Amino acid sequence: MRTRKQIVTTGFLAVTAAGLLMSCQGNKTGGSTTAPTSNATNNASAQGGFKIAYVDLDSLEAHFEYFKEKRAILEQKQQQMDNQLKSKGRALQNEYEDLQRKAQANMLTQEQGEAAQRSLMTKQQQLEQEAQNLRAVYTEQETKFNEELQKKLDDFLKSFNSDKRFAYIFSYRTAASNILYKDESYDITADVIKGMNNSGTSTAK
């Protein structure tokens, strides 16, 4: 079963974990059309030839309001699922212990004991199936969450880079990146965070 920590690392990280976010294409500008001017933007304007930039995913996840709200909703759903399964598991364990006490006190006939054991086994199988179904539902919700974030990021970067100032925009994450060295003058994270938070997508439903 996935943990809350795994939600963070497989959420927005899964969107861009491969390193290269996209080869930006020109597109009609939508949403927030004027991006803040960063050092990377100035470098792109001042220099000719091949231009690149990068986005720090750790910072993006920490400050993109929509991501934080949606992640909190997923964590809440996971907690509810865990509580539900734990509660039913405890009830099943109590029923098993009660059966043991009755058997030791000779309060059950052999037929009654065997019937009670079959009932417990059936309930255990049902609980395992329920847990499997809940995990499948949660995984589907998490996948949709990742796909939605992927689209939001892709759409924003197309708009952000509609002037083709950058040929490539890479992702960066501390201790989990293919980029061995980064020049912070090419960091456009602040611009991306501000633009995405101002694009009207910061309210989770």
Image (cartoon, rainbow, N blue to C red):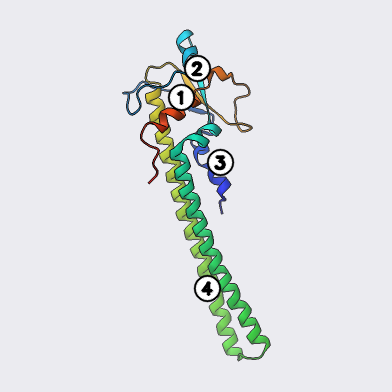
From the image, state whether disc 3 or disc 4 is nearer to you: 3
From the image, state whether disc 1 or disc 3 is nearer to you: 1
Q: Residue beneath label 4, please?
A: 123
Does the image show residue 48? no
Q: Amino acid at mark 1?
A: Asp
3D distance between C-alphas at marks 3 and 4: 35 Å
Quick one: label 1, few (<14), some, or many (20+) residues within 10 Å?
some
| Tag 4 secondary structure | helix
3D distance between C-alphas at marks 4 and 1: 54 Å
Q: Residue at x 42, y 33 (%)?
A: 197
3D distance between C-alphas at marks 2 and 4: 60 Å
Q: Are marks 1 and 3 in contact (CB under 8 Å)?
A: no
Q: Are marks 2 and 4 in contact (CB under 8 Å)?
A: no
Earlier in the chain: of badge 4 and badge 1, it is: 4
Q: Quadrant of the N terminus?
A: bottom right
Q: Residue at x 63, y 24 (%)?
A: 180
| Tag 1 secondary structure | helix
Q: Residue beneath label 3, please?
A: 9
The residue closer to the viewer here, 64 or 1, is 64
Q: Residue at x 58, y 18 (%)?
A: 183
Q: Residue beneath label 1, please?
A: 191
